[in-house]
Amino acid sequence: MAALLQFKHHCRHFDDTILESWKDGGDCCSWGGVECDEQTDHVIGLDLSKSFLFGSINSSSPLFTLTHLQRLDLSWNNFNYSHIPSAIGNLSRLTHLNLSTSNFVGQIPQQQLSNITTLVSLNLSYPPADVIPYLEVGSLKGLVQHMTNLKHLDLSRVFMYSSTLPHDLLFNSSSLETLVLNGCGLMGEFPVAIFNLPKLKVIDLSNNYGLKGHLPNFPSGSPLKSLLLSGTSFGGVLPPSIGNLASLENIDIYGCSFTGKLPMSLGNLTQLVSVDNLIWGGNHFSPDSFTTSSLSWIGKLTKITRLDLGSKNLKGEIPSWLMNLTRLTELNINENQLTGPIPSSFMNLTRLTRLYINDNQLTGPIPSSFVNLTHLTDIDFSHNKLSGPFPSWLMNLTQLIHVDLSNNQLTGQILSQFSRIIEWLDLSYNNLEGSIPTNLSSLHNLKFLSLERNKLVGSVELSAFSRFQNLTSLILSHNNFVLGVKNISSKDANYFPSLHVLGLASCNLHEFPTFLPNNKHTLEYLDLSDNYLRGQIPAWIFDIGQNSHNGIDLNLSYNLLSSFERDHHVFHPRARIQTLDLRNNMLQGSLPIPSPSSSSLLSYLISNNNLSGEVSPLICSFTSLWNLDLSFNSLRGKLPQCFSKFGDSLLVLDLRGNNFDGNIPSMWRDGCQLRMISMSHNQLQGQFPRSLANCSMLEFVDFGNNQINDTFPFWLGTLAHLSVLILRSNSLHGVINDDFGFSNLRVIDLSNNSFSGKLPSKFIGTWNAMKTPDSSHSIAYMENLFLSNVSWTSGDGSFDYSMTIYNKGSELNYTKIPVIFYAVDFSSNRFEGHVPDVIGNLTRLQLLNLSRNHFSGQIPPSFSNMKNLESLDISRNQLSGQIPTRLTELTYLSSFDVSYNNLSGPIPQRNQFCNYDSKSYEGNPGLCVETWSKQCGNARTMPRLQQPPSITEEEEDSESDFKIKWTIISIGFVSGLVGGVVVGNEFTTRKHYWFVKTFAKIQRWYA
């Protein structure tokens, strides 16, 4: 008793702890935390864990006079970075010692502890922390070699000087059941024999990144229950004998280096309760481990409650063996390539609370059998191809909290009833019709609501949603209803008190909602784009997001806004603008640049306005900017040298359609991450900046329609990702050499320059991307994928490349470029010699224009290899000989022009050649047009031979081409994509109808 009272006196502690029961005159064996021997009354146990003890402790403490102690637990206290006193060795009868998580530091008294041979359990562990002063031990073997009775050893985050473990470690530890050496700095090869200690149940070697090893052949009957190796360098294959671990409940090998195929014997581990990334994440298992058939072993693990197969590239239908796992509470099979319907047998999984099958290619209706899954709290079916009516069974699932059915093809009306406790409801990007149910206002717990991109109609008052006092996100954009905003008073601060995200794009708004100034400090995302807002941008906009911890996304694009209520240079200093999108308005004056203190700006989009003046150097304050779009304004002057400050952050630079002049600065350094640069339609002069070669990730380069005076930039051939190169309408000159290549080119436009000499075959022969057969059956676009934390305004984090291709005077505007589009335009230059045969190897090519040059010789018969060709213009050259009859095999060729050459002989009369206008052949006196006209039933006659028109006449002829319309000639495509929609010699003004109809949105075209 005296020793305990002295310990209490010397030990600092808070009031109302276990030590308050230790008082003079009482029976110490009845005190809290004290255990006595029933016969001798000696204190044999002391449990002071979590007793709020603090201060230092040393060998003079009365605690170490309790020599009969068998169990001592001082864990979860704070001994203020004391060393473990060497007097611990006095307690030679100890069987259980726990000093974990009590802020002991320094060298462990190894010799004194090793002499306590009676120890059964030793725990000196530290909890995970970023920076802690560790306990240290010189030799693990020296510490435990005499503890032959040891069953439980936990030295987590105890640093070991001798980090390499001897092979005879724990050789005498046949009683060991638990070994935890998590985060001890171990290195070298782990003694494999330890895995087969006869009583070992738990082994945790996690977070020893330099520790190597392999798993042994496990014997039958092994008692191992927990195998934790994450964050080590264990490797090799998982042995089939792992299936002998019939008692295994927990396995974590995340981030190891295991290879080979996952053994089917894993299906014998029937005690596992979770199968997820802790097994396969961060390893290097073969792809054939992750098919629905090779994972069928999971179907035998009927006790698992959690299964995560997300992002495993699984294909085929949802496997039937999943339905054996009737104890599942959480199932994740998202982000795969699963197809077919959702099986109705999901009804067997009656314990499910969370189900994630999003981001697959599932089709058909959502089965009504889900009505049986009454425990569901979270469902995510988004980003599939699910169709059919909106699922009525949702109203029966009263526990639902999170519902995401977005990005499908669901039809019908939205239910009038949902779970009363629902917090997240995302129905965006479907085909839902009807009006918004008024009963939604009763969902008082709702925090997130998105009905974006549906076909909802009627008249909707925004005030109806103001009853959601917990609502943080409301997105109603792009529907067919009329949104009323006048019933909300600007003086009522109770409307949307928690709102952070508001999307009202394309809601027929004619004015800014009056309540928004009340939310200006908390808003993080505001999208009012594609409305009828006109006049001034209100002053409160510049105070938006002052209390936001995240970046702010502001989108006012596609309105009729013309000016600013106050100086647009004065955003509030605390406003962390991340995206500023003011595109397609009527803004005038100078560039509206946020305050330089808003250094978080990532995306600055202000194209298609009437802004003028020079670009202020203030814009260079945003050193994290990755998307800068100033295109199609009236900006002038020289490009700022300070653009170089953007460093390696800038990915997209679009300055098209302005009045910039002078030389292009050499501003790109090593490490440049630029993907897209477009400076076309300006008045830039001088030469191409060679520093652009530092931008090794460049995919899209457009310097067309300037006054650049230079030779061909051969050094761009070092850019392995370059796909689009547009240099048209400059003053480029000289011969193109053949000592470089552009292997990834899909589009190249050098038209309307002064290049001369022969087209080098080797140059064209390196365009491998135009040769490889395309087996794709889906439409994809050239785009740049941005950062993972991109804003709402930037959508899915991608930026679609756009371009303009010219043909017979028409501008073909591509607002998106499909990866299946390939074009070559060398027209209006001074190229001479034969047309290279190697062009015929460009089998993916769809548009080829070599007109207005000095080519001679025959039309290469190899052109017949370009089966995807839709437009071929080789007019106004000096070609001779006959038109190759094999060109009739180009069944998608709808635009064909060989006029004003020296061709002779018969005109092919098969397939589409009977449909071409006679103007396609004029100016070739030797062509047999009369036979062609008669055979094809064509009443048109060949015009008399004319001299090639003058430059003025050509311009007039080009203007007349704008009056001709596009036509769709045929249907059916070789690749099975969108077939046979071909480009003819019939054009519509400034639109490539085929592309706009099939691939793109019609946007405002640059005039």
Image: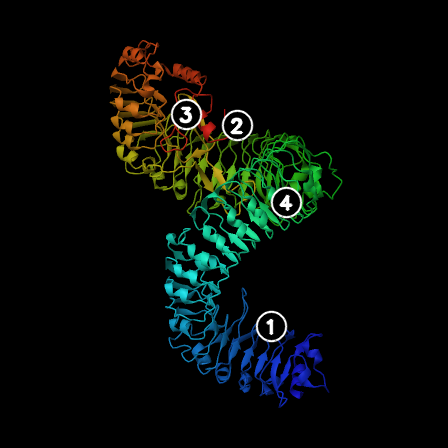
Q: State the CA–CA distance, disc 4 to disc 1.
A: 48 Å
The mark nearer the N terminus, 1 or 2, is: 1
Horizontal side of 789 relative to 548 (left or right) equals left
The mark nearer the N terminus, 4 or 2, is: 4
Q: State the CA–CA distance, disc 4 to disc 2.
A: 44 Å
Report the residue marked by disc 4. 395
Report the residue marked by disc 2. 1004
**Residue 922 horizontal/vertical position (percent):** 32, 14
Residue 463 lies in quadrant: top right
Q: Please name which of the two marks, 1 or 2, marks the residue nearer to the observer.
A: 1
Q: State the CA–CA distance, disc 3 to disc 1.
A: 75 Å
Horizontal side of 970 relative to 21 (left or right) equals left
Disc 4 is placed on an element classified as helix
Disc 2 is placed on an element classified as loop
Numbered tag placed on residue 806 in the rendering: 3
**895 to 269, vertically: above or below:** above
What is the basis of the colouring in this image?
rainbow
Report the residue marked by disc 1. 76
The mark nearer the N terminus, 3 or 1, is: 1
Nearer the observer, 844 or 957: 844
Q: Please name which of the two marks, 4 or 1, marks the residue nearer to the observer.
A: 4
The mark nearer the N terminus, 4 or 1, is: 1
The extreme right residue here reads: 491
Disc 1 is placed on an element classified as loop
Nearer the observer, 558 or 694: 558
Disc 3 is placed on an element classified as strand
Q: Are marks 3 and 1 in contact (CB under 8 Å)?
A: no
Q: Please name which of the two marks, 4 or 2, marks the residue nearer to the observer.
A: 4
Q: Are marks 4 and 2 in contact (CB under 8 Å)?
A: no
Q: State the CA–CA distance, disc 1 to disc 2.
A: 67 Å
Q: Are marks 3 and 2 in contact (CB under 8 Å)?
A: no
**Residue 832 horizontal/vertical position (percent):** 27, 25
